[in-house]
Image (tube, grey):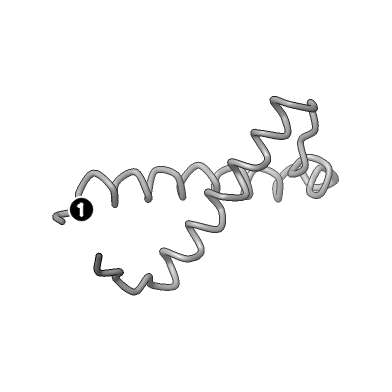
Amino acid sequence: MVKAKMSELDWAAWVFVILGAINWGLVGIAKLDVVQIVFGTSPVLLEIVYLSIGLSGLYWLYKMVTDKK
């Protein structure tokens, strides 16, 4: 199996995807929204974080669908 080197964008998107998955897992298990707790004092920043997580998920979905391996 050959592993391609991930770009900075790939890494940043991957981190957001993982953080989003962990956050949603905590919401489902314990009704604990860590993003809301950390960024809840700034609604604009909260929206930016949620938007970044969503766009990162779409980015990785696109990469998976268009992968030519």
Residue drawn 73% across and 26% down?
Answer: 29
- Asked if residue 31 is positioned above or below residue 10 in the image, the reply reads above
Task: Point out residue 57 in the picture as x, y percentages from the top left corner.
Answer: 45, 44
Task: Point out residue 65 in the picture as x, y percentages from the top left corner.
Answer: 23, 44
Task: Point out residue 66 in the picture as x, y percentages from the top left corner.
Answer: 20, 49
Local crowd at mark 1 within 10 Å, few (<14), some, or many (≥20)?
few
Q: Extreme left residue here?
A: 68
Instruction: Please indicate whether residue 37 sits to the left or right of residue 17 in the image.
Output: right
Instruction: Please indicate whether residue 38 sits to the left or right of residue 66 in the image.
Output: right
Residue drawn 70% across and 45% down?
Answer: 46
Residue drawn 39% across and 43% down?
Answer: 58
The residue at which mark 1 appears reads as: 67
Task: Point out residue 3 in the picture as x, y percentages from the top left corner.
Answer: 30, 69
The answer to which image quadrant residue 26 occupies is top right
**Nearest the camera: 54 or 42?**
54
- Asked if residue 2 is positioned above or below residue 30 in the image, the reply reads below
**Nearest the camera: 13 or 51?**
13
Image quarter (top left, top right, bottom left or bottom right) of the N terminus: bottom left
Query: Which amino acid, mark 1?
Result: Asp
Q: Secondary structure at mark 1?
A: loop
